[in-house]
Image (spheres, rainbow, N blue to C red):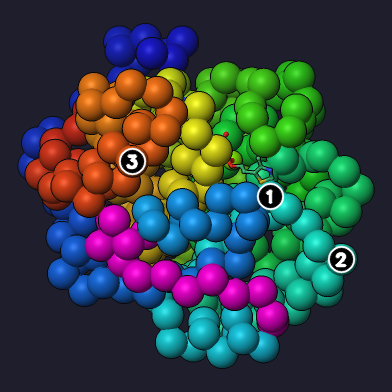
Amino acid sequence: MSKATTADHHDLAADDALRMSIRRAVLDVRARTPLAQSFTNFVTINLVANAQLAAGGTAAMSYLPDDVIDIAAMCGATYINVGTLLPFYKDALGEITASLHEAGHRWVLDPVAAGLGATRTAILKAMRDTPPSLVRANASEVIALDALWGLSDGSDVTDGPAGVESTDDVDTALGAAKRVAKHLRAGDPDGLGAVAVSGETDLVTDGERVFRLPGGDMMMTKITGAGCALGGVAATYLCVAEPLVAALAASLLFDRAGERAAAESHGPGSFQTEFLDALWAIDADTVSTSTILEANR
Ligand SMILES: Nc1ncnc2c1ncn2[C@@H]1O[C@H](COP(=O)(O)OP(=O)(O)O)[C@@H](O)[C@H]1O
Ligand SMILES: Cc1ncsc1CCOP(=O)(O)O
Ligand SMILES: [Mg+2]
C-alpha cells in the first residue's frame, strides 16, 4: 500500500459513474474487438499483441510513418513505446506524432527508460508539443518525462533512470504525474488525458483526480513486457473510452490478472502463460468492482 493512508482516500461507491464507465469499456472491447495499432519495442512486441487480443482487441504492429499514418485513419488508437531505438526512429516518430496530433487521433505513450541516453531524450522531447492523450509508465519514467518536457518544478527527488525498471516509488511521482496529465489535456482535442503510473500500488490521475489501485503481484515485474503490454491494452481501451477510463480499466484488469496468474503459476514461465489466460478470462464485473481509492480533495 502506498504511503498515503486510507484516511486520505475513499473507495469509489459501487454505483459511481466511473465504475460504470470502466465496466462499459471492458464489455465494449470484448464485444467490438477494436484495433489499436502499435509502434513498439521488439523485446516485448509479441506479448503486447497477445495481451491486446486476450483483452478482446486486435493488433497491428508497424514502424514506417506512412503505414502508421494510414492505419491511424482506420484504427481506434495508437500505442507508441520507445523501449528499443533504431536510427530511423528520430525522423519516423516526429512525423508520426505530428500527424496523429494534427488528426486528433488519440495515442498512448510508454516512455520506456525515459531520461536514458541522448537519442531517447531527443525523441521524447520532440513529443512535448504533439503529446499523447495517455501516458503509461513506471514512477521513474514519469518523473523523467516531467523533467525533460520542462514541466517539473524540480521538487521531485529521484534516483534517476536505471534502465527500464523504476528506482522510485509511485508516490514520489505524484506531482510529476499530475503535471504531465494536465499537459496532455491541454493538447487533447476534448481536453481529456490521463497518466497511469504502475507499481506496487498503481496511481492514475487526470491531473485533478488521483486514484490508487492496490493489488497486482510482484511476479509481474519478473516477466519482461508487463508494463509494455499494459500500455498496449490501455490503447485498446482508448478505442472505446476516454483516457482516464482507459487507464483505470487497463490497470485494474492487469492487477486482477496478475493476482490470478500468481495463484496458478510456479515461476515466470508459467506465470506469463497464466497471465494471458487471466487477461482473457477476467470479466467486466471483476474489473469494475475492484478497489479504487480516490484521494480526498
Ligand atoms: N510490486 C508490485 N506488486 C504488484 N504489482 C506490481 C508490482 N510492480 C509492478 N506491478 C504491476 O506490474 C505491471 C507492470 O508494472 P511495472 O513493472 O511498474 O512496469 P514497467 O515494466 O514499465 O516498469 C503493472 O500492472 C503493475 O501494476
Ligand atoms: C528489456 C527491454 N529493453 C528495451 S525495451 C524492454 C522491455 C521493457 O518492458 P517493460 O517496461 O514492460 O518491463
Ligand atoms: Mg516499462
Q: Is 206 drawn above or below residue 164 in the view shown?
A: below
Q: Return the residue nearer the eye: 132 or 116.
A: 116
- Could you give the CA–CA distance between mark 2 and mark 3, rounded to whole angstroms? 34 Å
Judged left or right of residue 19, residue 222 is: right
Q: Which residue is mark 2?
A: 87
Magenta stretch, residue numbers? 52-65
The kind of secondary structure element at disc 3 is helix
Residue 84: image x %, image y %?
73, 53
Going from N to C along the chain, the mark reached first, 3 or 1, is: 1
Q: Quadrant of the N terminus?
A: top left
Q: Is residue 214 magenta?
A: no
Residue for point 64% across, 21% down? 168
Residue for point 61% across, 60% down? 40
Q: Locate residue 103: give its quadrant.
A: bottom right
Q: Amino acid at mark 2?
A: Pro
Judged left or right of residue 244, residue 274 is: left
Disc 1 Cβ-to-ligand 2 distance below 8 Å: yes
Q: Amino acid at mark 1?
A: Gly
Q: Is 265 drawn above or below residue 247 in the view shown?
A: above
The kind of secondary structure element at disc 2 is loop
Judged left or right of residue 11, residue 139 is: right
Q: Which mark is residue 272?
A: none
Q: Is 283 drawn above or below residue 258 in the view shown?
A: below
Q: Which residue is mark 3?
A: 273
Q: Return the residue nearer the eye: 246 or 75.
A: 75
Residue 85: image x %, image y %?
78, 57
Check whether the beta carbons of the residues at disc 2 and disc 3 lie within 8 A of each other. no
Residue for point 20% across, 33% down? 290
Q: Which residue is mark 1?
A: 83
